[in-house]
Every structure is written in C-alpha cells, then in structure tokens.
Amino acid sequence: MGTRHTSSLKLTTQGPPYPPSEIMDKDGNFIVIGNVIQEDLTMKWTSAVVSAQSHVPEFGKLAPYKVVRQLSSDELATSDEVLYTVSLPLACNNYPMVFAPDQLPHAHSIVRPSLPLHEAYIPDYRPIDGRKITKPITLGQWCKAKGTMTVDVGDDYADFYFEFEGMIPHSLYTVMGLRKHEIRPKDTQRPGPLGIPNVFIADANGKATYWARIPDPFPPGNDSNRLIDVIVLWMSSQMSCGGAIGHHGLGGDVHAQLKSGPAPFAGLETRG
C-alpha cells in the first residue's frame, strides 16, 4: 500500500462553467452553488441565481454570468424552493461532447422542458411501476448532502472510498471521474464514470457508501490524462448508463451535488 488521503467533498450544483448549474428553478433560472464568473472573468465560489440569458462564449473561454440575485447560507439551508432539471437542448451550454455515443448519439437533437426533479423524465416509466421519488426536492433538502472521500494510492492504481450522509433518500447516484483531457478546448474527450458499475443508492436516511479501484489515475507529466476531480451526480433519470455517466449530462439527466475541492489530487502519482 502506498499513501492515503482523506478529504471532505464540497456541496455544489455545478459541473463545468456552462451551463452555469445543473439545477434550475421554476422560472428557468440556474441555481448556482459553485464558481460564479465575475465581470473581470475571475471565479468566485458562492451561491446565486443566474439568468439563463447569460452570454455563452465558445468552449474554453469565459464570460460573466448575469446574476439575478445572491443566495445566503441561511437561505440554502432552509429554502423550500423546488428544484428542476435543465431543459433540452441544454440551456447555456457550450460543451460539445455526446456523453453516451453508443446509447444516444443524437442526444443534442432531443427537446424536453425543464421539469421538477421528482417528475423528471425516466425512460419507459409507467405509474404502475412504483416511482420512489414522488415529493418535490427542495433546495434546503439538496444542501444537506455531505461526503468524505478517501484515496489509497498504489503503484499502478488507486482505491477510492466514499461515505455519504444527507443525500436524497431512495435515490440512484452516479460517481463521475473528471480527467484533464475532458476539459481541454481541443481534442476534447468525453467524461466517464469512476468505476463500473458506477452507481449507489442512498438509504431511507440518506446514507450510502461507494468504492472503486481505478487503474493508473494519476500518471505523471504535464500532458497526461490525469484524474483531476470527482463529482457525485444525482440521477433524475434514476438509471445507470453503463460506461457513460448519463445520456445528456450537465443537468439534463445528471445533477452534480458533491465534488472534490480544488486540485484534490495534486502531488499524487501512479505509474501504470
């Protein structure tokens, strides 16, 4: 066994900068817990309601968000605001990737309205089947989520262990691993899961655990395709997508709720 690193995950609603969030409100604005792009193009980790009319630059560049209003920590903790999916095609999106090319190569052509999370689209769903998530999911409930990540680094692999509490009960989650080449402007690669199967289900109290062994996640070198972030996604589709994190990503059917902090794996190396 090599080295062990333990850290707390951060509450969020955000994946990449665009769309600004993977959660909307009833008015079609983004509810952002994450990096809000400022007028000087710096990023400030905060909470805000951001307009879907915000300017969207080409992938790899930034533009200031159009902030409707700020959200206080007290409001996050107590808000009964009902949470919604992002409409399809994805609003305020500049990420060019198809997330599940074998399963849904035409994902960008699908049109679907923003829906409350508890009424989100589930393929082949029938009321007689017994949908478990039937009550509105509120911002206050969303913000109860907590998680701890422990990474055991070996020579050519790393084991990832997670413990969660305060998650949405009886919900299917996906754990995603983001790599360096998946956010580069040229020759962008699609993101994928952290382990397969890559899902867990929170129990009635919102608790869960997850484990994955990843081969060579931290190869050395500036050009290597290192793992740089881990994101825990609430699945509004309530389905696993095999080797994909979802069919649409970015708030269409996956919704970031927890993520590792900035540069969580700096200094770690594997040599597979």
Image (spheres, rainbow, N blue to C red):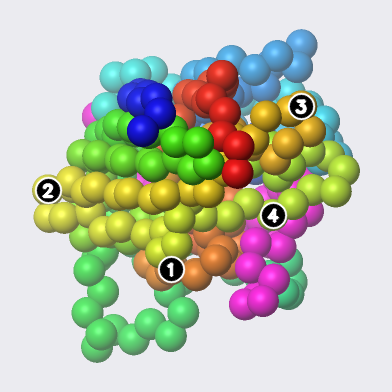
Is residue 67 rendered magenta in the image?
no
Crowd tier of the residue under label 1, counting other residues whose Cα lies within 10 Å: few below 14, some 14–19, many 20 or above: some
Q: Which amino acid does label 2 sit on?
A: Asn
Give the magenta part as a residue range. Answer: 78-104
Sequence-wise first label, 1 or 3: 3
C-beta proximity under 8 Å, tags 4 and 1: no
Q: Which amino acid does label 1 sit on?
A: Ser
Q: Mark 1 highlights which residue?
A: 240
Instruction: Give whichever of 77, 5 is nearer the camera.
Output: 5
Residue 205 has which mark?
A: 2
CA–CA distance in space, label 1 to label 3: 33 Å
The vertical placement of 134 against 261, above or below, is: below
Q: Mark 4 highlights which residue?
A: 190
Q: Main secondary structure of the magenta part?
A: loop
SS assignment at label 1 = loop
Residue at horizontal 55 percent and vertical 66 percent from the top: 243
Q: Nearer the viewer, mark 4 or mark 3?
A: 3
Q: Mark 3 highlights which residue?
A: 222
Residue 217 has which mark?
A: none
SS assignment at label 2 = loop
The vertical placement of 96 against 224, above or below, is: below
CA–CA distance in space, label 3 to label 2: 43 Å
**Residue 177's x, y, as percent?**
53, 45
Is residue 87 rendered magenta in the image?
yes
Residue at horizontal 12 percent and vertical 48 percent from the top: 205
Q: Is residue 16 left or right of residue 203?
A: right
Can you say which quadrant of the picture contains the C terminus?
Answer: top right
Q: Which amino acid does label 3 sit on?
A: Asn
C-beta proximity under 8 Å, tags 2 and 1: no
CA–CA distance in space, label 2 to label 1: 22 Å
Sequence-wise first label, 2 or 1: 2
